[in-house]
């Protein structure tokens, strides 16, 4: 027997008829007297609704892939999707992840400082060579550090780029808007303001539509 369903009163997604909240947007469905009528008419509604009929009924409720965004879960999602731009990233997930990345960078900087003090004697002379022009042990250590730092920089840059693009998708903007960052002096400030905006569901081509 096919399970009866109804539509979320906010995001329009199909959910079980007995659900008290939407598993997709988390909005409480309530217990109004029209619930049963909504369930009974689901099949007829599916047959008569046009492909875009849900667009006007979708409220701009917050969107986050994690049910409970947090510094650990959001940062893991940030790096898990670092090579994906065909998704969205909610505001809470994005800023929790940004905090997580900031903490990671502080820890990396602390570790580098320890390595420089212990193995390089506090010297800033990277890739130090001896009289014969060969790298000294300190020079080898500094070269390895330089390669590791370069790899970390590339990873963080890719993650930041794709993360901002996914956040722009959550706002309904094309990923090309990321190029605003390249505007001298004010580009980064404008992008910061944009990235702080709440999720957009209405008329957002990147939001799942029925």
Image (tube, rainbow, N blue to C red):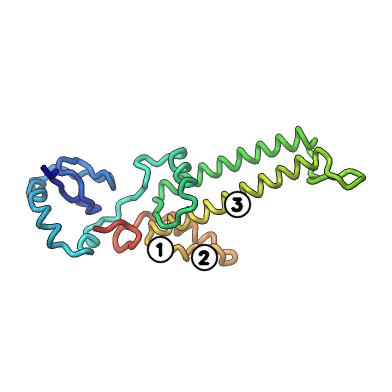
Name which of mark 2 and mark 1 comes first in the sequence.
1
Tags 3 and 2 touching, CB below 8 Å: no
Kind of element beneath mark 3? helix
Residues at circles 2 and 1 in contact by the CB criterion of under 8 Å:
no
User: Considering the image in quadrants, where does the C terminus appear?
Assistant: bottom left
Which of the 4 quarters of the picture holds residue 138? top right
Residue 154's tag is 3
Residue at (71, 43) in percent of width and height: 145
Q: In the current view of this chain or complex, which residue is farthest to the top?
A: 118
Of labels 3 and 2, earlier in sequence is: 3
Q: In this image, 6 relative to 62: left or right?
A: left
In the image, which is nearer the foreground, mark 3 or mark 1? Answer: 3
- How many C-alpha atoms fall within 10 Å of the one at disc 1: few (<14), some, or many (≥20)? some
* Element under disc 1: loop
Residue 147 is situated, as x and y percent measured from the top left of the image, at 69, 47
Residue 4 drawn at (x, y percent): 13, 45
Residue at the spot x=84%, y=40% of the render? 136
Tell me the residue at 77%/34% (across/down). Answer: 119
- Which residue is under mark 2? 180
Tell me the distance, in whole angstroms, between the alpha carbons under discs 3 and 1: 25 Å
The residue shown at (43%, 55%) is 166
Residue bearing mark 1:
173
| Drawn side of residue 47 relative to residue 135, left or right | left
Q: Nearer the viewer, residue 132 or 160?
A: 132
């Amino acid at each position: 027997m096919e399970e009866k369903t109804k539509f979320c009163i906010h995001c329009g997604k199909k959910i079980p008829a007995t659900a008290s909240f939407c598993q997709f947007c988390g909005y409480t469905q309530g217990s109004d007297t029209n619930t049963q009528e909504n369930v009974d008419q689901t099949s007829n509604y599916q047959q008569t609704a046009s492909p875009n009929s849900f667009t006007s009924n979708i409220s701009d409720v917050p969107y986050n892939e994690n049910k409970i965004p947090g510094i650990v879960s959001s940062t893991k999602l940030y790096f898990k999707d670092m090579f994906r731009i065909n998704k969205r990233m909610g505001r809470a997930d994005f800023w929790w992840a940004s905090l997580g990345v900031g903490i990671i960078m502080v820890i990396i900087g602390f570790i580098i400082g320890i390595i420089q003090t212990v193995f390089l004697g506090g010297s800033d002379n990277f890739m130090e060579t001896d009289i014969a022009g060969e790298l000294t042990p300190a020079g080898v250590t500094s070269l390895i550090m330089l390669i590791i730092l370069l790899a970390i920089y590339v990873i963080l840059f890719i993650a930041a780029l794709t993360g901002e693009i996914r956040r722009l998708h959550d706002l309904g903007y094309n990923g090309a808007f990321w190029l605003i960052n390249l505007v001298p002096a004010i580009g980064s400030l404008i992008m910061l303001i944009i990235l702080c905006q709440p999720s957009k569901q209405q008329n957002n081509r990147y939001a799942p539509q029925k």
